[in-house]
Image (cartoon, rainbow, N blue to C red):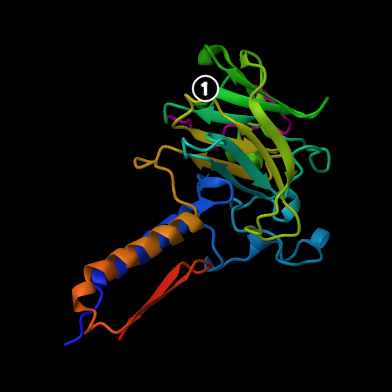
């Protein structure tokens, strides 16, 4: 009778590899809140197929809210954070999009990046009734904000609404984009850190996202920023990016190379355990497909 590798171990290896690659990326943990739009949703408006500015091609991913402007020029892809405490880039926060964070688009410039640390946000639907970037006495539940500037090189600072009842934010330009609010800080915010660590801005070379070019804005958050909701939009509110790091099991996710090493080690351990039955177990072959997160095993 043949002695085979327990199927439970193979199943464990497959699930381990799949789970890791589902959340781990070049930029760390993907904390983007998915808007639920997919190619199977019955509509192609969000793909930019009719966007003449890009030749009518499908030029962005589906992370763009219903009713907002399509096309890579406004496309906000996602938020990412490095969660490995042993990494030199621990708490490195990255924001990625086809939108030009430095120069804006068609006169509509970048907003501030807002953070909510208590998990309580206000509904923004109906929060704007007139056209224009209007100051409103409402933080929408955000206690902190990051402002970045390219006036003399990239600088990134951290601000706090110490008394939220007296703090203002500025809305996106178009009332129909009110779900993108807020755009920027208004009065009542206090700068508490004038220079966050390791700010950078450049091209995305990961190949993760659809489209011709993407931009990456990154900096390291303070260590006490553990759990939060995060939000960004541009002046017009044409796309609205949301993220959340309130996961209950927020643990570092191994990179593909680490997963491959662990998987190989587990296979080796299984082989050691079956040493006595080697006369009956003539061969074990496993192939790990990292690109598609699959493992193929055969025993003879």
| Vertical position of residue 2 compared to residue 184: above or below | below
Answer whether residue 293 is visible to the viewer in this image: yes
Marks counted in the figure total: 1
Residue 189: horizontal and vertical position, in percent? 61, 15
Q: Is residue 252 left or right of residue 284?
A: right
| Vertical position of residue 133 compared to residue 47: above or below | above
The local crowd at label 1, few if under 14, some if 14 to 19, many if 20 or more residues have their Cα within 10 Å, is many
**Nearest the camera: 114 or 183?**
114
**Nearest the camera: 219 or 97?**
219
Measuring 47% from the left and 24% from the top, which residue is drawn there? 224
**Nearest the camera: 223 or 268?**
268
Residue 154: horizontal and vertical position, in percent? 76, 29
Q: Main secondary structure of the magenta part?
A: loop
Asked if the magenta segment contains residue 9, the reply would be no
Q: Is residue 69 left or right of residue 254?
A: right
Measuring 61% from the left and 40% from the top, which residue is drawn there? 94
Highlighted range, magenta? 120-136
Callout 1: SS: loop
Measuring 80% from the left and 43% from the top, which residue is drawn there? 105
Image quarter hosting the N terminus = bottom left
**Nearest the camera: 261 or 117?**
261
Residue 145: horizontal and vertical position, in percent? 60, 25
Q: Is residue 207 left or right of residue 299?
A: right
Image quarter hosting the C terminus = bottom left
Residue at mark 1: 143
Residue 289: horizontal and vertical position, in percent? 48, 71
Answer whether residue 170 is visible to the viewer in this image: no
């Amino acid at each position: 009778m043949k002695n085979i590798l327990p199927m439970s171990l193979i199943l464990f290896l497959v699930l381990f590899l799949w789970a890791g690659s589902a959340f781990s990326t070049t930029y760390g943990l993907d904390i983007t809140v998915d808007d639920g739009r997919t190619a199977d949703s019955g509509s192609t408006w969000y793909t930019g197929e009719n966007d003449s500015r890009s030749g009518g091609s499908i030029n962005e991913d589906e992370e763009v809210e219903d009713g907002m402007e399509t096309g890579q020029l406004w496309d906000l892809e996602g938020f990412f954070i490095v969660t490995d405490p042993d990494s030199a880039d621990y708490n490195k926060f990255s924001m990625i999009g086809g939108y030009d964070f430095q120069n804006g688009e068609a006169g509509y410039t970048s907003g501030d990046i807002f953070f909510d640390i208590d998990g309580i946000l206000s509904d923004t639907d109906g929060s704007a009734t007139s056209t224009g970037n209007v100051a409103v006495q409402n933080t929408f539940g955000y206690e902190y904000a990051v402002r970045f500037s390219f006036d003399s090189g990239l600088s990134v600072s951290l601000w706090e609404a110490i008394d939220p009842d007296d703090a203002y934010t500025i809305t996106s330009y178009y009332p129909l984009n009110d779900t993108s609010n807020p755009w920027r800080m208004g009065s009542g915010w206090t700068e508490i850190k004038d220079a966050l660590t390791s700010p950078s801005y450049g091209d995305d070379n990961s190949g993760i996202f659809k489209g011709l070019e993407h931009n990456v804005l990154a900096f390291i958050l303070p260590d006490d920023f553990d759990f939060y909701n995060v939000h960004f939009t541009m002046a017009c509110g044409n796309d609205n990016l949301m993220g959340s790091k309130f996961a209950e099991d927020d643990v570092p996710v191994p990179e593909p190379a680490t997963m491959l090493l662990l998987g190989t080690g587990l296979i080796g351990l299984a082989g050691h355990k079956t040493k006595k039955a080697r006369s009956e177990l003539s061969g074990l072959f496993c192939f790990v497909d990292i690109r598609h997160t699959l493992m193929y095993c055969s025993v003879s």
